[in-house]
Image (cartoon, helix red, strand yellow):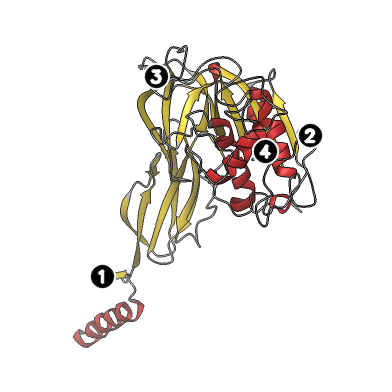
Amino acid sequence: MKGRLFSIVFVTILLCLVLGNGAACTGEGTTTYTLTITSTEGGDVTEPGAGTHTYNATQTVDLVATPETDYHFVNWTGDVATVADAENAITTITMNGDYEIAANFGFDMTFIDEVPDTNQPPTVTLPTTIITTNFCAPVAMSNVLEYWDDVVNHDNAQNVTAGLIPETVAEYLGWFMDTNFNPGPGNPDRGNGPHLGTFDKDILPGTTDLIRWDAGHPPVPPPITPPPFPPPAGKLGYDWTMTRDLAVGLDFYTTEIDAGRPLVVSFVYWNPVDEDLAFIDPETSETIDVFSWGAPMGSSMPPNPEEYWMTGDIGHAVTGVGYKLDWDPDGPEGPLPPDDYVIVHDNWSTTPENVAVPWANWNSSHAADPGLDV
């Protein structure tokens, strides 16, 4: 009898050694495995919970991921070969080994990732460039052109920026838009007399001319006057669909963002107030900083800070990259009321990359559609 018992114990120990790889053997010969669970910011795994758990081999374990307010479940990643549905917040995993999995959450917003965030001032490579703190429209539009050319690598945008950095692209745009000119060395066919900045009516015509411009593809009049410099080396021209919106407002903006097209959006004035609220999107690793509107200022000139902009036909242009509607960023107990927010890239180094501001101060939108990517 003792010999038989010894044989059973010996066989059990031998099986444990052969199985290895983290499997545990109980006195009854049951194989177990560990399941380690983590989650990104924005939610928790409520079943079976974060941490390391032990289960019998082949056991089916329920998984439940629960997002926090303003977040949504994205997927399960890691050792997900036996997860029934890695895209579903409520699913199961079959324990055929030791597994490590993570629940991933994303911020509830519509957002175009990887749009450049170029800041003023532009470079000074052209003899016509007049640098002031009012180069916002060309800089904002240079982000859009660089996005289609260098980030998306769109077929109908290849070398539209000629491999130039966005700050230099903004210089060329500044001439075509007549930024800070007239009278002066800018495009004489645009602008309405001496001004600082860019009139919103000149943003799209100037952009159209730059996009279309190359050695064999001159700008469409106006401007009747050609630029006093040749296209940059390697510049190719295209015909895009350009749309300026002064009436539709938020619906137009969200339609463009939903289609994956960043755009230039102008506000009547620019006096953002930092609310010291930031939301991280684990899906894109982007941080969204919340701002509200301060009171309008009559001028962007000294002694007012440089981020205060005048009202009227110039305003302040930024690059629209996303939105979050009916949002209460500080919760029901905070002073901010729910509002429709747009997420933009400002062109000042003193502001964060992704600025969420209420829509109420909107002036105009300027959209560029390169067409189908063939």
Tag 1 and tag 2, C-beta contact below 8 Å: no
Gap between marks 1 and 2 measured at Cα: 91 Å
Q: Position of residue 326 (x, y in %)?
A: 52, 21
Q: Amino acid at mark 4?
A: Ala
Q: Amino acid at mark 2?
A: Ile
Q: Is residue 98 left or right of residue 71?
A: left
Secondary structure beneath dot 3 equals loop
Residue on which the image places disc 2: 224
Residue on which the image places disc 3: 302
Gap between marks 4 and 3 measured at Cα: 40 Å
Label 2: how many residues lie within 10 Å, few (<14), some (14-19) or many (20+)? few
Gap between marks 4 and 1 measured at Cα: 61 Å
Callout in the foreground (4, 3): 3
Quadrant, the C terminus: bottom right
Q: Is residue 144 left or right of residue 324?
A: right
Residue on which the image places disc 4: 259
Residue on which the image places disc 1: 27
Label 3: how many residues lie within 10 Å, few (<14), some (14-19) or many (20+)? few
